[in-house]
Image: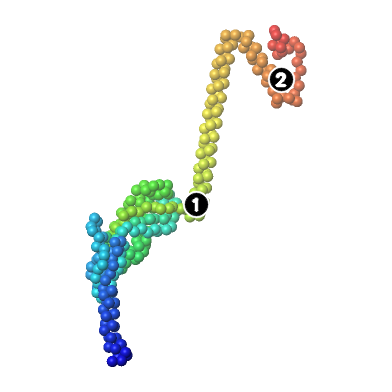
Amino acid sequence: MTVAARLAAWRMPLFAAALVGALGLASVVMVPETRQAVVLRMGQPDRVINAFRPGGQSGAGLEWRIPFVERIVWVDRNLQRFTSAAEQVRSNDEQVLNLDIDTTYRVFAPVRLVSTVGGQDKLVDQLKAILPALLREELGAHSANTLLAPGAGGATARLRAALDAKARAYGAQVIDLRIAAATLPEPGLQAALARMQLDREQRASLEQSRGSAETQAIIADAKVRAAQIYAQSYGQDPAFYDFWRAMKSYEAVFANPANKDGTTIVLSPDSEYLRQFRGK
């Protein structure tokens, strides 16, 4: 038998062996710990491999499927997160805020997910589409200051519950939801800065007014106490009080820098005003 004849004789068995090997490889699927596999038979969900069960054992490993008849849709088994960026919300005090919302979820019913939206990417798109209306409903009733505070006054908890109720229709559970970032659009930012500046100016003016009033009160009290001290000293030593009054008057008239190069005062040596200078 020639070499060509021998090759022809082995061709069909080799082809059959390769086909069986390929079908065998196509029949085996490796399911990792972190993923759930929804097996579709003729386009309809048939079974789930490594389905999520709280506290349950993992079903990861090698599994069989029928090639060309069964197809696998992969769904993450662990917690997943997505961010809805720059969602616009108007607060009840007419402030427009751009909010970044972080949502953490888990798919607990993969068959329901595949049957309703087809896959995990479509689930995220669906939740992002639902979120703006819920934001307006749950957060719009609060002031901007409340929304910017941690927890947003309990509004984020109610928002999470509302989004969770929607997500369960697709076989998912919203575990956590929080405001990751909050910014003001440019017009709103300028208006907020103007209000902050006006508020600080008003506070400064109020403090200045309070300080001035307190100063006037202190000065008035000091004058009253000085008058009382003067009266007491006059009663105890009228001569000293008279001398002290004269010295204060001389200081105001002769030692005051404001009177320098001013009006000249001419007094006679025996003027009563100069009596203290004479020592009498």
N-term mark: 1 or 2: 1
Vertical position of residue 208 compared to residue 261: above or below: below
Q: In x, y percent, where is residue 93?
A: 43, 49
Q: Give how far across and how far down residue 68 sits, in percent.
A: 27, 76
Quadrant of the frame with the C terminus = top right
Which residue extends farthest front?
A: 1
Q: Is residue 183 visible?
A: yes
Outermost residue, top direction? 280
Q: Is residue 195 above or below residue 108?
A: above
Left or right: where 214 falls relative to 82: right
Residue found at x 62% / y 10%: 240
Q: Quadrant of residue 119?
A: bottom left
Q: Residues within 10 Å of mark 1 (few under 14, many from 20)?
A: some
In this rendering, position of residue 113 left or right of residue 82: left
Q: Nearer the viewer, residue 3 or 256?
A: 3
**Which residue is at 69% across, 17% downward?**
250
Classed neighbour count for the residue bearing mark 2: other residues with Cα under 10 Å, few (<14), some (14–19), many (≥20): few
Answer yes or no: is residue 272 visible: no
Kindly indicate the quadrant of the structure image that contains residue 74: bottom left
Q: Name the residue tied to disc 1.
A: 189
Asked whether the residues under the numbered discs 1 and 2 touch, taking CB atoms below 8 Å apart as contact, a structural biologist would say no
Residue type at the position of mark 2: Phe
In x, y percent, where is residue 208?
Answer: 54, 34
Kind of residue indicated by mark 1: Leu
Mark 2: which secondary structure? Answer: helix
- Residue visible at 23% across and 70% down in the picture: 46
Cα–Cα gap, marks 1 and 2: 61 Å
> Where the N terminus falls, by quadrant?
bottom left
Residue sitting at the far bottom: 1
Identify residue for label 2. Answer: 254
